[in-house]
Amino acid sequence: MRASELGERGIIDLIWKTLSGRTGIEPGGRVLPHPDDATAIEMPGGKYLLMKADTFVKRTDAPRGMRHRSMGRKALVMNVSDLAAKGAHPKAFLFSIGVPKRYDSGRLEEIIRGLAEASDKYEIPILGGDVCESNELFVAGFAVGTTEKPLRRSGAAPGDIVAVTGPFGDTAAAFHILLKGLEAPKRLRKKILRSVYEPSARLKMGINIAKAGLASSSMDSSDGLAFTLNELARSSRVGIRISSLPASPLALEFCGLSGLDVSDLVFFGGEEYEIVYTIKKGMWDEALKVSKGCGRSLIGIGEVVPGSSVTRFDGGREIAVPPRGWEHLR
């Protein structure tokens, strides 16, 4: 079987199957079990050490027109976003960079400047790493953080409110512009493309929601909202019913001009570094208060229900939301 047939998630399952018994942790003993956003080790004093590795590959992760400084920032954001979804304070970042022989040194410097800017923004020191020769440019990051209350993908219960840290649809609209040549007015195009050129991690929100104990489960949404919702439902063995579409104003405007279905952009985009939460029953008002204190406001989009599927209302009908999303090698 070829790697493209397995896909990213199939390869991850193959890795864990092959490493069975070699991870130093008994089955079922993981604080954040596979396939959660990060892994964790319990430390003395009631804290947990969280670790995350994520790789930026220029060919697959840099949309057309992205500047090298933005590539560097994104390489760090990819890792910090997963720590944020687990409620962890970033403590250290290391990276390995693969460089083609003839790559321009000025562009390499811009990538490092981008890493430095993201390091300052998220207050995570860069401690070192490795340089190697490669056929294509990549930055393999490794982030470490700590928390007293790591949030799992599992834990949602019927009655919990499903919420997101921001609207969706801009990145999918950007890919339609960049990859499929769809047109948009210059003002709208510039704002939409910013979503893929300048992604941000919801770090402050992630830390404060976890610290307050308001969420029963959480997950980074960078593989797409539909996939994330289905993964949360599967991990918690519950169903999710979406009653409100978290569409961004820009995505709505773009769909009005292009004729695209905004729900497709919202659910099946990807590369949005928002966090999807299930907020514990009776704690919504407090969660809103905490989120507004972080300079943003949680958006309630539905509820956790008994069952095993993710559905949404469309024209008065309840229809399934399939677990489609971004997957490497496919």
Image: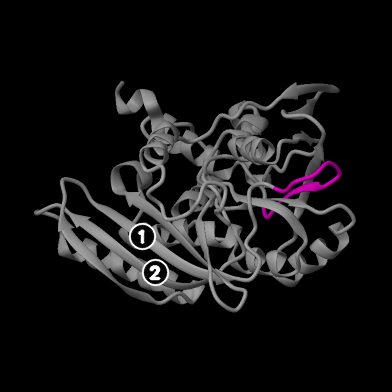
Q: Are marks 2 and 1 in contact (CB under 8 Å)?
A: yes
Crowdedness near tag 1: few (<14), some (14–19) or many (≥20) residues, C-alpha within 10 Å: many
Query: In the image shown, does 284 or 214 lie closer to the viewer?
Result: 214
- Residue 193: image location, x then y, percent: 48, 48
Tell me what residue is drawn at x 87 percent, y 61 percent: 285
Q: Using the image, determine if residue 296 lies above or below residue 27.
A: below
Name the N-terminal-most of marks 2 and 1: 2
**What is the magenta segment's predominant secondary structure?**
loop
| Residue assigned mark 2 | 93
Give residue 197's position: percent from left, percent from top.
44, 53
Is residue 248 visible to us here? yes
Residue 115 image offset from top left, x and y in percent: 36, 67
Query: Is residue 299 shown left or right of residue 188?
Result: right
**Residue at mark 1:** 141
Relative to 236, say whether 44 is above or below: below
Say which amino acid is labelled 2: Phe
Q: Nearer the viewer, residue 180 or 196?
A: 196
Is 328 left, or right, of 229 in this rendering?
left
Q: Is residue 200 visible?
A: no
Left/right of residue 202 with respect to residue 116 in the rendered view: right
What span is colored magenta in the figure? 155-166
The extreme right residue here reads: 282
Please name the amino acid that badge 1 sits on: Gly
Q: Nearer the viewer, residue 20 or 89?
A: 20
Magenta stretch encompasses residue 146:
no
Mark seen at residue 65: none
Neighbour tally class for label 2: few under 14, some 14-19, many 20 plus, Cα within 10 Å: many
Q: Residue 243's x, y, as percent?
A: 81, 36
> Which residue is pictured at 75% across the width and 22% down the height?
319
